[in-house]
Image (spheres, rainbow, N blue to C red):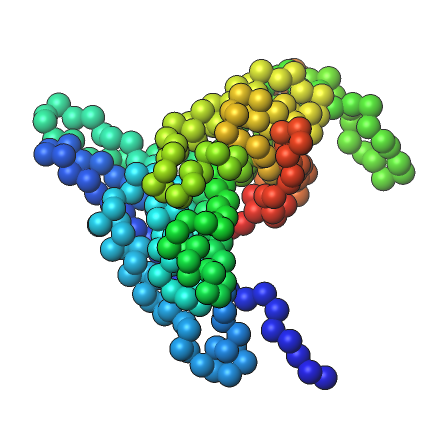
Amino acid sequence: MPTVLGQNQYGKAETRVVRVTREGPVHHIRDLNVSIALSGAMSDVHTKGSNAGVLPTDTTKNTVFAFAKEHGIASAEDFAMRLARHFVSGQETIHTARIRVEEYGWDRIRTDGDAAHSFVRRGRETRTAQVTYHGRSGEQGVQSRQGGQGEQWQVLSGLKGLVVMNTTDSEFHGYVKDRYTTLPETRDRILATEVNACWRHARQQEGGEGEQAGKPDWDASYERARGHLLAAFAGTYSLSLQQTLYAMGSRVVEQEPGIDEIRLSLPNKHHFLADLRPFGLDNDNEVYFAADRPYGLIEATVLRDGATAAVPVDLTNLP
């Protein structure tokens, strides 16, 4: 039976780049893990073994390091947009570039002296970003890449591994029960989860010329969205983790006009009351057994009214 080539892409995964900016004795760090995927007119390399249209993945790795030097790293989103535009505009066979970035935070170690070059790895979530840039194919694509017409940007920001807990103000009861149900209802429980979220920025926030025009403050936008997630988690009296998820997503969309959609993946980090009765001890919601698996997994997308979902449903679970 004949075969036909389907969707394909190639690139360099997990290029680790650390950019140190020196302002006299004061240094600043941006620590990224960058993965690049390129697609376009690539059928010949698969079906004929022709590399004439292939930019080596080693070149994409080198570009990451060179851009870190030439342009610096203002933010994960800004850096990804620069890379995406470069690959699509620079090569005729590349029509789409998808850049995924994880950022690892570092906090400054305060010292008694004047030195400001010591850091400790931040013990909080990992920041994420994904930029996808589409250019037109063929001769019109050359013109559009030069003139800025026909471009399509998608900018996704997010986080993973944000562990949160409420020690009360959470219930779970009134659910369906069948012959296999053993879970007791509860009116007071620990609610803990590891927030994995990905939100899509509205078109007007991306800027008509990518990283150059109308550039938002990506760092400030990230901190605001993170703050809304935490505030909604802490401020919601929860009757289910699903209800809490919706409250968290709704707060981000309602409070941030530049965000049209957010996808959340919340594993329920179960805490079960330890049975202390064999030891003659009461347990008034004080001592718990933290179970790591299996765990409930609650996932949903929250959209601005009228918006169309575009965040892939599995993006929040990527390793």
Residue 149 x %, y %: 45, 49
Residue 229 x %, y %: 53, 25
Q: Is residue 35 above or below residue 241?
A: below
- Foreground of the two, 232 or 107: 232
What quarter of the picture does the N terminus occupy? bottom right
Q: Is residue 171 above or below residue 34?
A: above
- Foreground of the two, 126 or 34: 34
Q: Residue at x 66, y 79 (%)?
A: 3
Q: In this image, 121 relative to 227: left or right?
A: left
Q: In this image, 161 relative to 30: left or right?
A: right
- The part of the image, by quadrant, that contains residue 58 is bottom left
**Could you tell me how many numbered marks the image carries?**
0
Q: Residue at x 54, y 80 (%)?
A: 47
Q: In this image, 318 relative to 187: left or right?
A: left
Tell me if I can see residue 195 in this picture.
no
Residue 177 x %, y %: 86, 32
Q: In this image, 270 relative to 122: left or right?
A: right
Q: Is residue 189 above or below residue 144?
A: above
Q: Residue at x 49, y 51 (%)?
A: 150
- Foreground of the two, 43 or 224: 43
Q: Residue at x 74, y 24 (%)?
A: 172
- Foreground of the two, 213 or 14: 213
Residue 255 x %, y %: 53, 21
